C-alpha cells in the first residue's frame, strides 16, 4: 500500500511546517507576491484581488514570524508593499546632492579644463580625460540600495534633505528592485535623472486639455508632477524613465573612473544614457557638445546641455568642491531657448472633442536654432492673464495682438508665449475677444463653470469633431453597428460619404444610385457590402436611451442617457423640454422656468448635465441633423435591463481607479445587466469591484465578507459583456 502523500507546502498550516518546508514556501510566496507587484505597479494591470494579495502577504509574514532567520535584509516584509496614501516624509542625504556650475561658451569650457590642469599641477602634454554626457532635463533622484536591494528613493530637495518618494519610484519598471552581478557594495546610492519622453508629455497634456484640466509646461514639470503623487498608483500610470549618472554614499567603490562607474551602473541593471563619450581634449569636448546639439531635436527626451566630468576619481577627490558645486565637473548649456517676437494674430483650432484652443501666429523668429511661427496660448484665461488656479499670471497682463512677446521653446516641445514686453506695447495693440462661435462650424461655443476650455456645441455637424462623434455614434453602447467601426468611419468620412449620423442610414440608397459602388472599393466585395447594409438596417430600430447616448451630448454617458429616457418618453419630448428650458439668470431668487426645473429635477440629473442638454438642443445645427436622422430610424422605448445575466438583481459597488472602463461605463454596464449599483458597501452588497488604489471600501467589504473582484474578474463574471 502506498503511503499517503504529504500535504503540499502551499496548503500546509504555518504552525505545522518544518524549517525546510517553511523555506520553500517562503520562497514560493516571495516569487508570487513579486509577480503580482510587478503586474500592479509596473504594468498597471493587477492579477489578483486585493484580498488574495493580502492573504499571500499575511502568510509570508506569518512564516517569518515563526522562522525569523528567513527574514533576510531583502525580505519583502521590510518594504512598502502597497502604495500608502501619505504625505512625503523627509530624507537626509548621506552625501549631499550638489549642483553644477554652468559654461555658456567655448571659452568657459577651455577655462574649466585649464583650471583643472593648474589645480592638479599637470605637466604640459599630460593627458586629461573627461566623460561627456548629455545633461538630461528631468529631476534628480537618489536611490539607495542595501545589500543590493532597493530601500529608499529621495528627491534632491535642497540638496541636503529631500522627499521620500520610495513608493512612487517603486512603480518604475526601469529602476531595479535588486542589483545585478556579484561584488555589489553593501551600501550603494545610485543617482540620476527621472524624466518623461517628449511624446508621452504631449500625449498626457493633450488628454489634460481635453478634460479641461491643468496643463503641464514641459516634460520636466510633468515628470515632477507625476512623481509627487501621494497616490503611487497614479505615478504608475505615468511613463517615467531613469538614467543613472552619479552616486552618493558607497560603502566600496566598484570603479576608479567616472566612465568605469557608468559601466558598472549599467551592469548593475540601471539604464545609462548611451550617448556618453570619453573626450581627451577641449576640442573633443566641444565637438561632442556640437554633435549632441544637432541631434537634440530628434532625441526622445529633453536635454539642456552636456556635462563634462573629469574621468579619474582620485583626481576628482583632490579637486573637491567650491561652495555647492564640484570643481571637477561643469554643465555646458545649449543656447537660450527664449526669444522675443511680435504676435501677429491669434487663431482658434478646434480639437477632436470640440475644445477651442488659441494658437499664436508670430513674426517668425529663431529660438534655439529652430524657426518658430506658431506658439500655444493654452486657453482663454491664459490670454487674459489668469492662471489655471484663477490667480493672475504675468502680473495679470493680458496678451494683445500687436504685442511683443517672449516665447520659449520649453524643452523642444510646442513653443509657448511666456511673457509680454509691456514697454513695447503699441497704441494699436488690440485686446483679443475670444470667439463664442466655433470657427469650424459656426455653432455656439460654451464654457462651463470652473472649466478653462470653451467648447463647440455643434457636435453632430462640426467638421472638426465629426469623425470622433461618428465613432461614438456607431460604438457598442450606442448604435452598435456591426462591421462599422473606427476604420470604416474614417474611410467613409474621408470620401465624403458619411458626414453625420443620418448619412449612415442613407448609405445603401445612395450606393444603389451611384456609379461608384461600395463593392468596388478595395477590401469590399458583394457579400461584405450586403452584410454592412444588413447590419445598418438591423439598427434602424433603436431604444431611446441608446439614441440619446449616441448623440454624444457632453456629460451624457450611458447612465444619464438612461435617466433621461426614463423621464422623457420620446426624443421629441426631450427636445421640446430642452428648448423650453430657461436656466437661472444668476440673479438672486431666479431658479429658472418650469421646464428647466423639471429637467434639472429629473432623477440623477444635475445642473451641469441639464445645461449640456439645453446647449445641445439650442444649437440649430444639431436639431437639423437630429431631424434628418429621425427620418431614417424608429425610436423604441427604453431598453429594459436583462434578467438572465449572472448579476441580475445583485448589488454592485465600484471603487478604486478602474482602468478598462470609466465609472460611468461600469455603472451603465452593470445596470444593463440588471444589477443595482450602489455608492457604498454594506451587508447587502454582493460584489465590490475594486481597481488600484481602493481604500476604505475594500476594508468595509472585508468586514462584511463581500466578494471582491478585480476589473478582469468582473469581466469574466459577466461573460466579457
Ligand atoms: S552630475 C555633483 N550628470 O543637472 C553634481 N547631472 O545642474 C552631480 N543632470 O542636479 C550631477 N544630467 O539633476 C550630472 N549627466 C548628468 C546630468 C546631470 C542632468 C542634472 C542633475 C543635477 C543638475 C546640475
Image: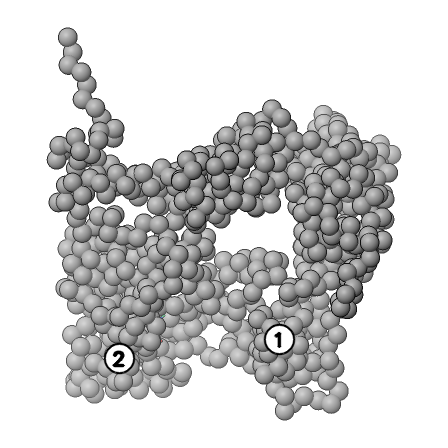
Residue 231 is left or right of residue 118, and the answer is right
Badge 2 density bin: few <14, some 14–19, many ≥20, Cα 10 Å: some
Quadrant location of residue 64? top left
**Which x, y percent locates residue 640?**
69, 31
Give the numbered dot on residue 309.
none
- Depth order, front residue of 513/141: 141
Is residue 691 visible to us here? no
Residue marked by disc 1? 386
How far is disc 1 from disc 2 in space, using C-alphas?
Answer: 41 Å
Residue marked by disc 2? 326
The residue lying at 53 percent from left, 79 percent from top is 338
- Depth order, front residue of 154/89: 89
Quadrant location of residue 611? bottom right
**Which x, y percent locates residue 48?**
39, 38
The residue lying at 62 percent from left, 75 percent from top is 386
Q: Residue reaching furthest bottom?
A: 423
Amino acid at each position: 500500500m502506498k503511503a499517503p502523500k504529504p500535504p503540499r507546502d502551499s496548503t500546509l498550516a504555518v504552525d505545522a511546517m518544518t524549517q525546510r518546508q517553511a523555506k520553500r514556501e517562503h520562497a514560493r510566496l516571495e516569487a508570487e507576491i513579486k509577480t503580482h507587484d510587478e503586474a500592479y505597479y509596473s504594468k498597471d494591470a493587477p492579477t489578483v484581488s486585493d484580498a488574495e494579495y493580502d492573504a499571500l502577504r499575511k502568510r509570508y509574514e506569518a512564516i517569518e514570524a515563526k522562522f525569523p532567520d528567513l527574514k533576510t535584509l531583502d525580505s519583502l516584509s521590510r518594504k512598502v508593499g502597497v502604495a500608502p496614501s501619505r504625505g512625503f516624509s523627509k530624507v537626509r542625504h548621506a552625501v549631499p546632492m550638489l549642483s553644477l556650475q554652468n559654461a555658456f561658451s567655448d571659452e568657459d569650457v577651455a577655462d574649466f579644463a585649464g583650471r583643472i590642469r593648474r589645480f592638479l599641477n599637470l605637466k604640459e602634454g599630460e593627458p586629461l580625460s573627461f566623460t561627456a554626457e548629455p545633461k538630461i532635463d528631468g529631476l534628480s533622484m537618489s536611490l539607495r540600495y542595501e545589500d543590493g536591494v532597493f530601500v529608499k528613493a529621495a528627491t534632491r530637495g535642497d540638496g541636503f534633505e529631500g522627499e521620500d518618494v520610495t513608493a512612487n519610484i517603486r512603480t518604475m519598471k526601469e529602476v531595479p528592485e535588486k542589483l545585478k552581478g556579484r561584488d555589489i557594495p553593501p551600501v550603494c546610492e545610485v543617482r540620476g535623472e527621472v524624466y518623461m519622453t517628449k511624446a508621452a508629455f504631449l500625449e498626457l497634456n493633450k488628454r489634460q486639455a481635453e478634460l479641461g484640466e491643468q496643463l503641464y509646461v514641459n516634460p520636466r514639470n510633468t515628470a515632477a508632477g507625476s512623481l509627487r503623487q501621494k497616490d503611487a498608483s497614479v505615478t504608475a500610470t505615468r511613463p517615467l524613465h531613469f538614467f543613472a549618472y552619479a552616486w552618493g554614499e558607497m560603502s566600496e567603490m566598484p570603479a576608479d573612473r567616472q566612465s568605469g562607474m557608468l559601466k558598472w551602473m549599467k551592469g548593475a541593471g540601471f539604464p545609462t544614457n548611451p550617448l556618453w563619450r570619453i573626450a581627451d581634449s577641449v576640442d573633443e569636448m566641444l565637438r561632442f557638445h556640437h554633435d549632441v546639439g544637432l541631434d537634440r531635436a530628434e532625441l526622445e527626451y529633453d536635454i539642456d546641455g552636456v556635462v563634462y566630468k573629469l574621468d579619474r576619481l582620485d583626481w576628482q577627490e583632490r579637486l573637491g568642491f567650491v561652495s555647492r558645486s564640484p570643481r571637477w565637473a561643469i554643465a555646458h548649456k545649449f543656447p537660450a531657448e527664449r526669444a522675443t517676437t511680435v504676435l501677429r494674430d491669434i487663431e482658434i483650432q478646434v480639437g477632436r472633442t470640440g475644445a477651442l484652443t488659441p494658437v499664436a501666429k508670430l513674426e517668425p523668429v529663431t529660438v534655439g536654432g529652430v524657426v518658430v511661427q506658431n506658439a500655444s496660448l493654452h486657453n482663454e484665461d491664459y490670454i487674459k492673464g489668469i492662471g489655471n488656479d484663477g490667480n493672475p499670471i504675468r502680473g495679470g497682463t493680458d496678451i494683445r495682438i500687436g504685442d511683443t512677446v517672449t516665447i520659449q521653446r520649453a524643452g523642444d516641445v510646442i513653443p509657448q508665449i511666456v511673457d509680454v514686453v509691456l514697454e513695447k506695447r503699441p497704441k494699436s495693440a488690440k485686446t483679443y475677444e475670444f470667439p463664442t462661435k466655433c470657427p469650424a462650424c459656426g455653432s455656439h461655443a460654451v464654457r462651463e463653470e470652473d472649466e478653462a476650455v470653451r467648447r463647440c456645441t455643434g457636435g453632430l455637424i462640426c467638421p472638426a469633431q465629426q469623425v470622433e462623434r461618428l465613432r461614438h455614434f456607431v460604438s457598442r453602447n450606442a448604435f452598435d453597428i456591426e462591421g462599422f467601426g473606427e476604420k470604416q468611419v474614417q474611410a467613409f468620412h474621408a470620401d465624403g460619404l458619411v458626414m453625420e449620423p443620418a448619412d449612415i442610414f442613407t448609405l445603401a440608397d445612395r450606393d444603389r444610385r451611384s456609379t461608384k459602388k461600395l463593392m468596388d472599393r478595395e477590401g469590399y466585395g458583394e457579400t461584405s457590402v450586403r452584410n454592412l447594409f444588413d447590419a445598418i438596417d438591423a439598427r434602424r430600430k433603436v431604444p431611446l436611451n441608446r439614441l440619446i447616448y449616441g448623440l454624444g451630448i457632453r456629460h451624457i454617458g450611458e447612465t444619464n442617457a438612461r435617466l433621461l429616457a426614463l423621464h422623457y418618453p420620446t426624443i421629441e419630448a426631450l427636445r421640446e423640454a430642452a428648448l423650453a428650458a430657461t436656466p437661472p439668470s444668476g440673479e438672486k431668487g431666479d431658479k429658472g422656468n418650469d421646464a428647466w426645473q423639471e429637467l434639472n429635477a429629473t432623477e440623477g440629473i444635475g445642473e451641469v448635465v441639464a445645461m449640456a442638454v439645453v446647449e445641445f438642443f439650442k444649437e440649430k445645427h444639431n436639431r437639423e441633423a437630429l431631424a434628418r436622422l429621425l427620418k431614417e430610424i424608429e425610436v423604441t422605448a427604453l431598453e429594459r435591463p436583462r434578467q438572465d445575466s449572472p448579476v441580475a438583481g445583485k448589488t454592485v459597488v465600484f471603487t478604486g481607479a478602474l482602468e478598462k472602463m470609466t465609472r460611468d461605463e461600469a455603472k451603465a454596464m452593470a445596470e444593463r445587466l440588471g444589477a443595482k449599483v450602489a455608492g457604498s458597501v454594506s451587508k447587502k452588497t454582493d460584489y465590490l469591484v475594486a481597481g488600484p488604489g481602493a481604500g476604505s471600501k475594500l476594508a468595509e467589504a472585508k468586514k462584511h465578507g463581500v466578494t471582491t473582484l478585480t476589473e478582469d474578474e468582473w469581466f469574466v463574471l459577466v461573460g466579457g459583456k
